Amino acid sequence: MRYTNGFWAMRDGIVPAYAVEYADHMVKGNELTVYLPAKHIADRGDPMNIPMLTVTLSSPMEGIIKVSAVHHAGAVIRGPFANYRKENPRAEINETDEELVYRNGNLKAVIDKRPNHYRLSFYEGDQFLTESGYHNLAYMRDCNTGRKYMIEQHLIDVDEYVYGLGERFTPFVKNGQTVEMWNEDGGTASEIAYKNIPFHITNKGYGVLVDHVGDVAYEIASEKVERIQFGIEGECLEYFFISGGSPMKTVEKYTALTGRPALPPAWSFGLWLTTSFKPHYDEETTSEYIQEMADRKIPLHVFHFDAYWMDVLEWCNYTWDPKVTDDPKAMLERYHKKGLHICVWINSYIAQKSCLFEEGKEKGYLLKRADGGVWQTDLWQPGMAVVDFTNPDACAWFQGKLKVLMDMGVDSFKTDFAERIPVKDVVWHDGSDPVKMHNYYSVLYNQTVFSLLERERGKGDAVVFARSSSVGGQQFPVHWGGDCSASYVSMAETLRGGLSLSLCGYGFWSHDISGFENTATPDLYKRWCQFGLLSSHSRLHGADSLRVPWKFDEEACEILKEFVNLKCRLMPYLYAMAVQSHEYGRPMLRPMMLEFPQDHGCDTLDRQYMLGDALLIAPVFKESGEVDYYLPKGKWINLFTEEKKEGGSWQKEVHDYHSLPLLLRENTILPIGNNEESVVYDYSDGVTLVLSEFTEGGRAAAEIPDTHGKTVMKIRAKREGDEITVEVEGEGHYSVRNLGSGSVKLV
C-alpha cells in the first residue's frame, strides 16, 4: 500500500506520524524500550498534542532481534498468532551520549539518540546491513476511511536484491514489486499467491519476518526506490530481524524460529500418478493406469485419487462414490500389494448436500456468521460451509472422518484449497480475527491432517500434499506449486515460485508435471518430466487430461522411465538432503544465490537451481533444446556425459530429451544407489561413491541414511597432491568411482 505521491507529498487524506527523534528509553531485563516522538522536542510545549511511537527490542533467539513498534498500546490485538520458538538469550545493552547499542550474539542494533536524527541500524558484527532512518518508521491515518496503519522502511543498498515472500511467480528478484500477503487462487501466470509468507531475505544475508499472519503490504523499491517498505493495518507492528551471516544460515535461523520441516517418508520421493482433476475414472480405469505403467516398466510409487472419488455435489463427504468403486478397501488392498501407497484429495469445505453438513451444523463445527447461522457460499460447491479448525472438537471430528479412510488403506492426503476463507460477517470459535484467519487457516488445516497421519502412521511416515500455507506451514510438508499451464513460460513461472518459497524455509516442493491447465505437447511433456523428476517430489497431474506418458507418445514413456530410474538411483543422496532439511531447515531446492552467496553472478538466476549441496540443474525451457546457464567458479562435471567444465562463466548447450545440464560440484561425494526401480531400499548396500573433481587440499564429507533418516554410513575424502584419500565408516557394501583427476586410496 502506498501513502505518498512521489517523494515530497502525501496522498490525499493521509496524515503521517513519523518517528523523528529519541526522547527516552527504559531497560527491563533483555528488553530495551525507546520512546520516539513524532516531532522535535525543543521546549516544554512541544510534547503537547503529538503522537509518540514506542519501540521495544527483545531477543527470542541468538542472532534474532524482535522489533515491536507501537502507537496506542491499549488496542485490542486478536489472534491467531504464529508459534515461535523462544530461547531468550542474554542481550547486551550499552549507552553512550549519541547512541544505544543492543547486541544479541553477533547481531547488533544501534539507535541514534541525537535530536532530529532517529535511526535504527542493524549490523552483523561490524558489517552494516540496513537501517530504518528518519521518516521511515511511521503511524499513518487515512482520514477518508478512518483506517490506521503502522509502517516500517529499511534501506536497500546499491547492489542489494530482495527475495522470498512465499510462493511468488513474478520475477525472482522482488525489487520494484508491490506485494500483498493475501492467499488466493490465481495460477502461476498471476501475481496472486497460494502461499504468502511475510519473510524476505536479501543477498546481504539478513532476513526480516513480519510477526503478522494477516495482510502485510510491501512496497519493495517501488514507492521509495531505496527502501523496503512493509506495513499492516492497526496500532502495532512487530518484526524479527534475522541474521546468520549468510543467506543459508539466515534461512536456518528462520526455520529454527518458526519450525523445521518434518522428514517425509522415503516412499513419498517416488513417482506420483494421479487421476487428474476432471477426467472420468472408476476402479477399472485406475487399475488400467497402474497396469500400463507396470507393463512399460515405469516405476510407480504413489497413486492419487483426485476430487471425483467423492460425489461431485458432495465435496466433501469423505465417502467413496460407488460409481468409482463399490469396495474401496478391497481395491486399496490390491493396490498396496502392487507396492503402491495411496493418496486421496480432500478439502475443508462441506457442501450442503454432503451428509456431514447437518452433522457439522448441529455440533457447531462449521464457521458461523455473526447472527449465529452457518456461513455459506455457492462458490466452488453449492451451499458449502467451512470447517472451523479453531474449535478443538471440530478438529477431532474432521480427523475422525479421515481416520476411516486411513483404516481402509489411505496413506496420505492432498489438502487442497484453504484460500477461499471469508473475512466479513464471520465469527470463529476462538474469537480469532477474521482477517488474520484468512491466511492462517491453511496452517491449522494442514496441522490437523498432518497430526492425524503422524499419530496413525508414526513419525517419519506422515506426508500431506498441501496447496496453501502461511508462516510455520513448512512444518507439514510437502507443498506443491500451482496452478501452472502447459507452456514453457509457465514452467519457468513454476520454478520461480518454488525458488521463492524455498527461501521461506520450505524444504520440500513439487508441481504438476507438464502443467495443470491445458495439455502439453509431447515435447514439453518430456522436458517437464526431466524437471519434475529432479525435484524433491514428483507428481503427474493435470486438469482436463491424463498425464500418463503413452497419451503423448512412445518416446515420452521412455523418457519418463529414464528419469524415474535416475531419481531412484539418486535416493541415497536425495534422502540425505531431506534429512538436512529436517534437521537444519535447508531447502532441497536451492536458488543459486543461497548456495553461492559470494558469487554475484548468481544473484539474479532463476532458470536453474541446486538440488541439495552437490547437484546443479538447469531445466530446458525451449523446444529447440537450447539452454543457457551459469556455472559458479570451480570445476564441474556433467553426470550424463562426464564432460568437465570450468566455472565462472555462462554456458550454452543443446540437449536431447535424454539429458539436460546436471552437473556435479567440485570437492563433492555423490552416493548413487544400486536400485532404479524403488525409492525405498538399503541405500548403503551396493552404493557407488562418485567423486567429483577435487582441488589441491580439497575436502568433502557425505552421509548415507537409512529409510528412516538415521545415518548408517559416513564418508570423508581429501586430496593431497595427486592422491585422494577416501575413508568410510559404517556397514554397507560400496565402490568408489572417480570422475575427476588423481588416484584414489581407500583407508
Image (tube, rainbow, N blue to C red):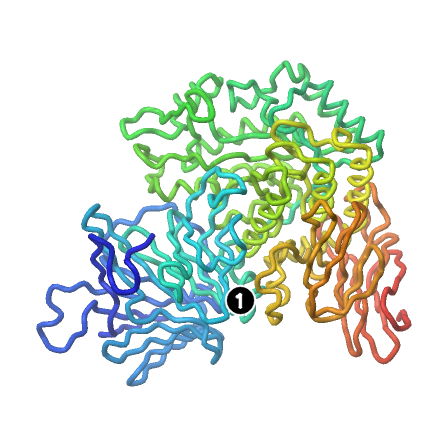
**Residue 443: horizontal and vertical position, in percent?**
48, 43
Is residue 33 visible in the rendered image? The answer is yes
The part of the image, by quadrant, that contains residue 563 is top right
Q: Amino acid at mark 1?
A: Asn
Where's the C terminus, which quadrant? bottom right
**Residue 697: horizontal and vertical position, in percent?**
78, 78
Residue at x-position 59% and y-position 69%: 600
Q: Residue furthest bottom?
A: 97
Is residue 667 visible in the rendered image? The answer is no
**Residue 444: horizontal and vertical position, in percent?**
47, 40
Q: Is residue 22 left or right of residue 564?
A: left
Q: Which residue is more in the foreground, 661 or 299?
A: 661
The part of the image, by quadrant, that contains residue 16 is bottom left
Q: Which residue is more in the foreground, 131 or 9?
A: 9
Q: Is residue 697 left or right of residue 313?
A: right
Residue at x-position 25% and y-position 65%: 18
Label 1, on which residue? Answer: 203
Q: Is residue 432 left or right of residue 596?
A: left
